[in-house]
Image (cartoon, grey):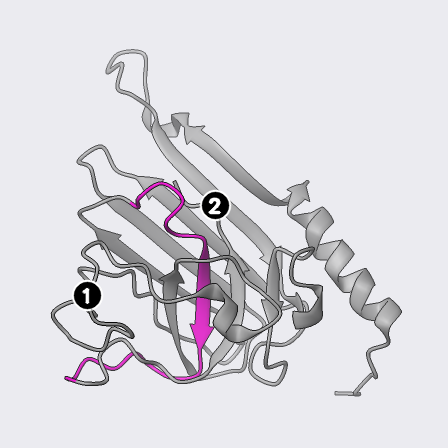
Amino acid sequence: MARHKLTLRNKRLIAAGAAVAAVAGGLGVAASAGASETTESTKKKPVEKVVVKTVFAPADTAGVAPAVTYNTALVPLAARVQVKEELRRDGGTRIELRLRDLAANRTYGAHVHTKPCGKLPADAGPHYQDELDPKQPSVDPKYANPENEVWLDVKTNRDGSARSIAVVDWRFREGGARSVVLHEAATSTHEGHAGTAGARLACVNVPFK
């Protein structure tokens, strides 16, 4: 595949395209009540959903683009990402991650983080935890685990596509969760390293409820 030098103008075009995609048409950021599960006969309260569907832009466009990549070899520019949050009627939360056009046949760690994406990988802050570990950074498996955090690790197929789902029995604190970060490796579970997954490769902003 031919390599193209990214000019400042091209970076801005990608970021602008991502931002437009995040508010219009088929590539949208939407917070909506999903009525698909509600019928007139059952009269159940609609399931609330948040959907972010966009593409990764250069890191220096953070603040404009909905999603950015810090490693274009593993998360290429214009690779596609979708995050869907669904508030379950039982009080829990379902989060789905879909990715396309990433490196093929590769495992990526992925977690919900507390802060929005920034120009630097660390800007997204730590993992969101339902019960906060008093000791930070949190590497204690009592707190850094898929029941207390949202882990969305994926393995891409030969086309670079992947999908994962996490379901937890709690909901996010208001304003407490703001992004999903992709990491370079599968998430560790052992003492002293629990929750770690290597370098942060990319980030997508999500207005979690």
Percent coordinates x, y for residue 4 in the rendering: 82, 83
Residue sitting at the far left: 142
Instruction: Identify the secondary structure beneath mark 1.
Output: loop
Return the residue at label 2: 207
**Quarter in which the C terminus is drawn:** top left
Q: Going by the image, does 195 lie left or right of 50?
A: left
User: Within the magenta stretch, is there residue 186?
Assistant: yes
Tell me if 123 is positioned left or right of 62 in this view. left
Looking at the image, which residue is at 79% across and 87% down?
Answer: 3
**Which amino acid type is shown beneath numbered disc 1?**
Pro
Residue bearing mark 1? 134
Q: Measuring 22% from the left and 78% from the top, which residue is drawn there? A: 139
User: Residue 125 placed where, x, y %?
Assistant: 42, 66
Q: Is residue 133 magenta?
A: no
* Amino acid type, residue under disc 2 in the picture: Pro
Residue 91 location, x and y as percent? 20, 37
The stretch of residues the image draws in magenta is: 172-191
Residues at discs 2 and 1 in contact (Cβ within 8 Å): no
Marks 2 and 1, how far apart at CA = 25 Å
Quadrant of residue 111 within the rendered picture: bottom left
Residue located 54% across and 82% down the image = 103
> What secondary structure predominates along the stretch shown in magenta?
loop
Dot 2 or dot 1: first in sequence order is 1
Task: Please rate how many residues cluster around mark 1, counting C-alpha atoms within 10 Å: few if below 14, some from 14 to 19, many from 20.
Answer: few
* Front position in the image: 35 or 20: 20
174 is higher (above) or lower (below) than 37: below
